[in-house]
Image: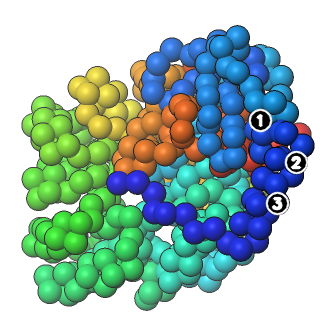
Amino acid sequence: MTTPPKRTSRRRLAGALLAAGLAASFGAAADSVALRHVRVIDGTGSAPRENSTILIEDERIAAVGPDAQVTLPEGARELDLSGRSVLPGLISNHSHLGMTDGTGAGPQNYNRGNIERQLRQFQRYGVTTVTSLGLNGPLFQRLRDEARAGIGVGADLFGADRGIGVPEGAPPMNVAPDQLYRPATVEEARAAVREMAARKPDLIKIWVDDFNHTLAYKMKPEIYTAVIDEAHAHGLRVAAHVYYLDDAKKLIAAGADILAHGVRDLPLDDELIEAIKARDAWYISTLDLDEAFYIFATQPEWTRTPFFRQALQPALAAQLDDPAWRRQTLADPKKLAIWEQGVKTNQANLKRLVEAGAKVSFGTDSGATPLRIPGFAEHRELRLAVDAGLTPLQAIALATGNAAALLGLDDRGVIAPGKRADLLVVAGDPSRAIADSEKIEAVWQQGREVSGPVVP
């Protein structure tokens, strides 16, 4: 699958024609920019290429190679980025939009201003493509259309429409009726899929979980089997929220295409690993999800860095600084143990799947709750993946080339001629120290520099 054809607005078309005319008049290349003397981390997992040039023409990468081998068009603008690394813009395959604002969550937050604020924050942190994996209202369709037309705000946008949950069960979210289906029967489930299919979502989302036994009902196998069957009949893939190993096995056997969270109750066994590979299914760990429940209350050193603090809305910053909130968050040792063990199990399962050669991608559940912070969560996920035993290059590949492949996008995710010029420029070398991904100096999207340093 490739991205839908781009519809250009009259204003953008007029601007493009004017720019082309001016370029012809003065003998200069239109919108040609060369990022010179950079370290290229291309998103494939390959070793970095030092002393390289990336030539951008209009919205695309025209050439990439050693400095001495890339011929620049006459009039191209040159930027000396010696000492910097350039990697593809990060891609989240599992986030949510319009769920939270400040410390609150609810349907009142699903509005254009709030969603565009979040998309800008993703972009500013180098996440140039976002998948809102369910809980989307009608506004989502308009925002996605605008992104396709090149007139959207912030990160590019993909998504899973409303998604399908359970009556009196998962997900335990306060959302409007037009943000989620909760079918009680097989036919209601099939009808919900048909309604979503008519709106042409990128994926279908289901929730199969009882949230650590706090919910009385879990989606029945006949419901999720019907959803998967109906989705496939309409050419749509199904991403499943999971927690337990047993559910993951049953969902893969039923034909689920994506496990949208890592298994966190038990280590993965050979049976599931082989089933994932045989089914050609994808796996998204979302390591940051469980850590976000408690980590801010423990106040590790990185929670005082400007890179983290810049991502916080004022109300959330005040909450995280509140000693009473921190004590309350850490007050239940049973919950804390479940969260901490969930992170460790998730990390071990991620490492095993990568080593087994399964299809593993990238997401964080950012935006689902106030504590899963858009943009920052993705960089935290990279660190947690490296802590799990992946190399920095493997972690980056999950968040770039692999994440693009999950969405079926062949126009982004790697730095190569013909690809979109969605780029993240950082100081240092994140192929050696993943924390250097946070030293953001510039973000480029579709050939334009759209954002500068996160930390001024």
Mark 3 neighbour class, 10 Å CA radius: few under 14, some 14 to 19, many 20 or more: few
Read off the residue under disc 2.
25
| Mark pair 2, 1: CA separation | 18 Å
For residue 200, above or below residue 79: below
* Relative image position of residue 347 (x, y in whole percent): 38, 33
Mark 2 neighbour class, 10 Å CA radius: few under 14, some 14 to 19, many 20 or more: few
Q: Residue at x 12, y 40 (%)?
A: 278
* Relative image position of residue 112 (x, y in whole percent): 67, 77
Read off the residue under disc 1.
33
Can the viewer see residue 137 in this picture? yes
Residue type at tag 2: Ser
| Mark pair 3, 1: CA separation | 18 Å
Residue type at tag 3: Leu
Q: Earlier in the sequence, mark 2 or mark 1?
A: 2
* Relative image position of residue 21 (x, y in whole percent): 82, 55
Residue type at tag 1: Val
Q: Secondary structure at mark 2?
A: helix
Q: Quadrant of the N terminus?
A: bottom left
Can the viewer see residue 322 in this picture? no
Tell whether 278 sits left or right of 234: left
Read off the residue under disc 3.
18
In the image, 387 versus 416, the foreground residue is: 416
